[in-house]
Image: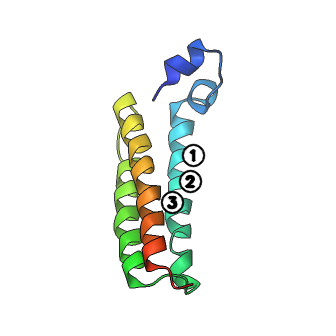
Amino acid sequence: YRQRDYENAGLKTLPSSRGVAAARREIAIYLVVQVAVSFAPVLLGVTGIPYLATAAVLGALVLAQGLTGDGSTKWARNVFLASIVYLPLLFAVMVLDGRA
């Protein structure tokens, strides 16, 4: 969401080098993989139902944020903010629910 700032500084980003559509596709792919992998601790027996429920709800929210939208600066900023909230909350619940 800071594409112009990066361009002015001479830094290459995916949207500036390959376009916004390519960046959106990669965001979608990585979000789907990230949410899918977030269920691994449950499958490995490291966490239980509280973590599973949290991962499902947070995963649905972050996917909804990332997979919908028009690729605008506002959308990019919201995806960025959602990711900042998503991972720390997920890790906090993992620590609280950890069985190891």
The amino acid type found where label 1 is placed reads Glu
14 and 40: which one is in front? 40
Q: Quadrant of residue 48?
A: bottom left
Helix, strand or loop at disc 3?
helix
Q: Quadrant of residue 18?
A: top right
Give the vertical position of 79 relative to 4 (above or below): below
**Tags 2 and 3 touching, CB below 8 Å:** yes
Q: Residue at x 39, y 84 (%)?
A: 49
Circle 3 packing at 10 Å, graded few (<14), some (14-19), many (20+), is some
The amino acid type found where label 2 is placed reads Tyr
Q: Earlier in the sequence, mark 1 or mark 3?
A: 1
Give the vertical position of 53 relative to 33 (above or below): below
Give the vertical position of 67 relative to 42 (above or below): above
- Disc number for residue 26: 1
State the separation of the CA atoms marked 2 and 3. Answer: 5 Å
Give the vertical position of 60 relative to 96 (above or below): above
- Quadrant into which the C terminus falls: bottom right
The amino acid type found where label 3 is placed reads Val
State the separation of the CA atoms marked 2 and 1. Answer: 6 Å
**Tags 1 and 3 touching, CB below 8 Å:** no
Residue at the far top in the pictured view: 8
Q: Is residue 28 left or right of residue 93?
A: right
54 and 14: which one is in front? 54
Q: Quadrant of residue 52?
A: bottom left
**Tags 2 and 1 touching, CB below 8 Å:** yes
- Quadrant into which the N terminus falls: top left
Query: Which residue is label 2 attached to?
Result: 30
- Disc number for residue 32: 3
